[in-house]
Amino acid sequence: MLTPSNFFYLVWLGLTLYSLGHLLLEKREPSSMLAWIFFVLLVPIGGPVLYLTFGSQRLERNAIKRKREIVRWTTDPLSSSELENPDFPSDVRHVLSLARQISEYGFTAGNEIELLSDPNHALEAMQSEIAKAQRFIHLEYYIIESDEVTRQLFDALEEAKKRGVEVRILYDSLGSIWLKRIFLHSLIKAGAKVAGFLPLSFLPQRINFNFRNHRKILVIDGRVAFTGGTNIGRKYLGRRFDQQWHDYSVRVTGPTCLQLEDVFAKDWHFTTQEDLFGSQYYPSVQGMGGNAIQVLESGPDSTFLALHHALILALNSAHKEILLTTPYFIPDPALMTTLRVAALKGVRVRLVLPQKTDQWLVHYASRSFYDSLLRAGVEIYEYEPRILHAKLLTIDGDWTIVGSANMDTRSFRLNFELNLLIYGKTVASQAKGLLERDLQHCKRVNLEQFQNRPVIHRMVENACRLLSPLL
């Protein structure tokens, strides 16, 4: 007779063996694998369930196949092969050439970039361009809140739809879990198309809580695009007294807009099976700006970790300075080594990290890495006024990286992310100016004082660090 204790044991054994087998079939960092193995073995039932829900680093294979079968005929015409352009120094050509090997896209020249440091200004710019739309508007965001900011943006989209403009909205099903249907009702009734990326499911073959679409994209007529790190909602625009956020977005015109449209088209097809790869969505674009841009699209279906590899490549090219801000900083060994070596060889490395955060576990894990970095000469500053959500990097006054990804395992390996690798002195100068303005509102972390922090702080930080491969 099967007793409750025997049943519990069989369920635990089955889930544990299945989880361990799944773990051993995945190619992941040994530290991450060992952390999950201990977690699965030491937490009965809960360990295997959490692993199967959040631990996998791969998408269902048939889902990847469907996505990769899409023919992106736009890539080659958009990708410049002029790597021998004399305007590019040899080390720049080297970075661009190698970056091309790990990305779906090649760099495009002739782009105009505007960094938007005020989220309210970014929203106004987005609404202004929406009002000018003539053919299509494609919007893809991780979080869309149910508040007056979303209503304001959706009203602008509805007006565009009434003018005959095609409107498509793609949101992440987990990130936007609190998006109320009533906010979409009028848009859908007007004819807009709306879809949720990777709907939440508890079916064994479709458990997908772990793979989230963290991208932020707005493309209008293929002529102008917006991306960056800001989500849609009043708290992200600093309009809630209890949550003031600091973030950056970017406005792009030029050939890169068509590659951003291509990223949206792939995600839309993956979600809805609707084909958006006709020429009407890829108009001829005249490049007039002075920036070369590499679109870095990354996710758990990628052959290479495009963002991670390009980041390491760009950081290794630094000769003078590295200035980086990120809200969630969980560096893997490669990133830690790169930052420490850069500082030790004389590059001035400055990190702007949050003092206030919405993720305390990540915050304490992040602080556990300070010692090693400070000893190597890395300067660490903690931003005090608001919740830091900005993601921006500039190198040597030449390179800028901006987008949706954080400096952590989730962004490098699990989330669908989108960043721009930009070569252009004007943009790099603007990025440096913004980051140095942020530094005026930071407190520098002193190595001696940090080492004398309370023992309980060190214990909490190191305990959280043990979970860093899982974060």
Image (cartoon, helix red, strand yellow):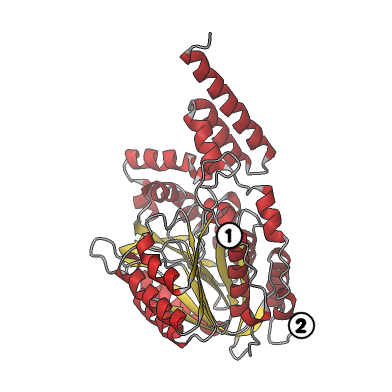
Which structural element holds mark 2? loop
Amino acid on which the number 1 mark rests in the picture: Thr
Q: Is residue 260 left or right of residue 167?
A: right
**Residue 150's image quarter?**
bottom left
Q: Is residue 311 visible?
A: no
The label nearer to you, 2 versus 1, is: 1
The correct choice, above or below, for 56 with respect to 431 in the image is above
Between 137 and 448, the one nearer to me in the picture = 137
Extreme residue toward the top, this view? 1
Amino acid on which the number 2 mark rests in the picture: Glu
Q: Is residue 274 left or right of residue 470?
A: right
Residue for badge 2: 84
Between 232 and 332, the one nearer to me in the picture = 232
Label number found at residue 271: 1
Point out residue 362 in the picture as x, y percentages from the top left corner.
42, 49
Extreme residue toward the front, this view? 189
Q: Residue at x 71, y 74 (%)?
A: 75
Q: Residue at x 68, y 43 (%)?
A: 27
Point out residue 97 in the picture as x, y percentages from the top left corner.
73, 72
Task: Give the crowd class for mark 1: few <14, some 14-19, many >=20 residues within 10 Å.
Answer: some
